[in-house]
Image (spheres, rainbow, N blue to C red):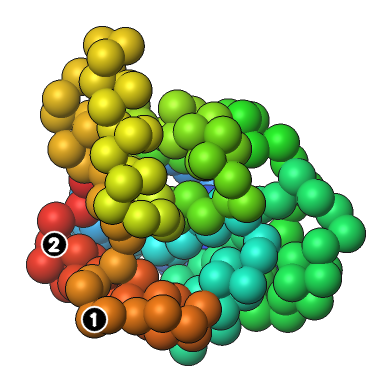
Amino acid sequence: AVETLLECLASGKAGVLTLTPRGLRFQSSRAQTRRFRFVRSTANWRFTEHVPAPDTVFIIGGGHVGLALSRVMATLDFRIVVFDERPNVDTFVNNSSAHEKRVLAFDQVGRVIPAGPHSYAVIMTPGHRSDDAALRQLVRKRLAYLGVLGSARKARQLLDQLRAEGCPPECLARVRTPVGLPIASHTAAEIAISIAAEIIQVRNAGGRG
């Protein structure tokens, strides 16, 4: 049961832990149940606990900032998944801080990043077009956090285009771009710290999604 629980957490899944006089059991489950429950009768008892999926940061783009952000987030309580469609990029291949690295087209990330209060996504692909492709995959999803790396001019262009195509205003309002807290960051490490700080700010404020 413990091995199954650890495997689920490592893969970003939720589940239900059950303890009875007969022993311990863990089942993977997406069902949102009460966090704790204890039922007792004259002859028996049963304790169940909903084990939520771990907070996961999905980094879309395995470049220098993606590598730096992975290193920062590895010091925090987050699972880290990095996507890139370029399998031979050094900063992607040599990223030892990510729990999972996946080679995937940027316009396909929406099918593998789940919505929900434990999903944090940061788009930092190599170009404007691929940023746009990834953002279109995620902008309508309810995520705890969605950010796009880039200048204010680039951010305005991305959002204006989506707005002109009829993307709901409430979806666009959830996009954080330029991403990160305004600390006048310039280097990859500084940008990563500003993004990590903003993610922590969102999580600690309870403003998930």
Considering depth in this image, is 45 or 204 the residue closer to the camera?
Answer: 204
> Taking 203 as reference, is 123 above or below it?
above
Q: Which residue: 24% across, 60% down?
A: 36
User: Considering only order in the chain, which callout, 2 or 1, is on the residue closer to the N terminus?
Assistant: 1
Q: Quadrant of residue 133?
A: top right
Query: What residue is shown at x 51% (from left), y 78% (from top)?
Result: 188
In this view, the residue in front, 84 or 102, is 84
Looking at the rendered structure, the kind of residue marked 2 is Gly
Counting labels gives 2
Q: Is residue 78 left or right of residue 43?
A: right
For label 1, count other residues whose C-alpha is less than 10 Å away and answer few (under 14), some (14-19) or many (20+): few
The relative height of residue 108 versus residue 182 in the rendered view (above or below) is: above
Residue 66 location in percent, x, y? 58, 67
The residue sitting at 24% across, 81% down in the picture is: 183
Q: State the quadrant of the N terminus.
A: bottom right
**Residue 21, image x and y in percent?**
44, 67
Q: Nearer the viewer, mark 1 or mark 2?
A: 1
Separation (CA) of disc 1 from disc 2: 22 Å
Q: Residue furthest top?
A: 166
Which residue is farthest right? 88
Residue 46 position by quadrant: bottom left
- In the image, taking residue 205 as reference, residue 185 lies left or right, namely right
Please report the residue visible at 14 percent of the width from the left and 56 percent of the height from the top: 207
* Of 47 and 97, the residue lying toward us: 97
**Which residue reaches farthest front?**
153
Look at mark 1 in the image and give the residue it sits on: 183
Q: Amino acid at mark 1?
A: Ile
Q: Which residue is mark 2?
A: 206
Residue 105 seen by the camera:
yes
